[in-house]
Image: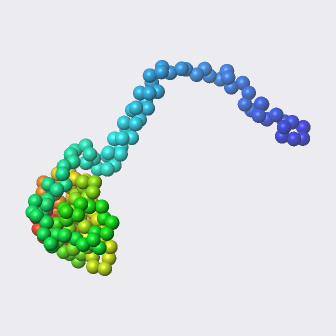
Amino acid sequence: MTTFDDTDLFSEAFHDFRSVGISRRRPALVTPVAMVAAALLVAVGFLWARGGPLLTDHSVDASTLLPQFAAEQTSRDRLSSDDLGALRIDRSTTRFLTETSSGRHYAAVGSAGSLCVVTVQPGELSALTCAPPTPTARVAVDETLLVVASSGPVPAAASGWREAGPDVFVND
């Protein structure tokens, strides 16, 4: 016996396994029920990871979330084609909110119906920040600007936030 084939290690190591145990056959209903339960657990996990707004808040028309949308669009509210670029928003919904050190901020309704804030900085591309259109929607642009839906919770003044307009808060 000079080669690996001559030793026949495979048959010596792995023979006679059929008599080790007898497999039980599960009822045909157990596997589908287990698969459905697993899929539900995964779905609940995704909802929980998103913060759960899909379970508690219902979607509303984003144009009803801020009082600025109730007023007619003025020339100050309109953005140029250069400022909008390829941003996916409804151009007729842009409304001027305020100006901070990070630029001019406009509220808008996104093409998917979300509540959005467009930030325009001279000489740079405009930035778009959106949130799902729920009654408690909050759009945090950066650490200096927060837009809260009319029925949403307002930030604490003790944290440095002050109101810069209806439902618009800045942190200087």
Q: Quadrant of residue 168?
A: bottom left
Quadrant that contains the C terminus: bottom left
- Residue depicted at x 40% and y 32%: 36
- Residue depicted at x 24% and y 60%: 90
Quadrant that contains the N terminus: top right
Whether residue 25 sits left or right of residue 107 in the image: it is right
- Residue depicted at x 31% and y 46%: 48
> How far across and down, in percent of the image, does residue 25 sit?
54, 20
Considering every residue shown, the one lying at the far right of the view is: 1
Taking depth in this image into account, of 149 and 24 the one nearest to the observer is 149
Depicted 18 relative to depicted 70: above or below: above
Whether residue 71 sits left or right of residue 122 in the image: it is left
Whether residue 7 sits left or right of residue 135 in the image: it is right
- Residue depicted at x 21% and y 48%: 59
Depicted 90 relative to depicted 77: above or below: above
Considering every residue shown, the one lying at the far bottom of the view is: 123
Residue 69 in view in this figure: yes
> How far across and down, in percent of the image, does residue 28 sit?
48, 21
Depicted 126 relative to depicted 44: above or below: below
Taking depth in this image into account, of 72 and 123 the one nearest to the observer is 72
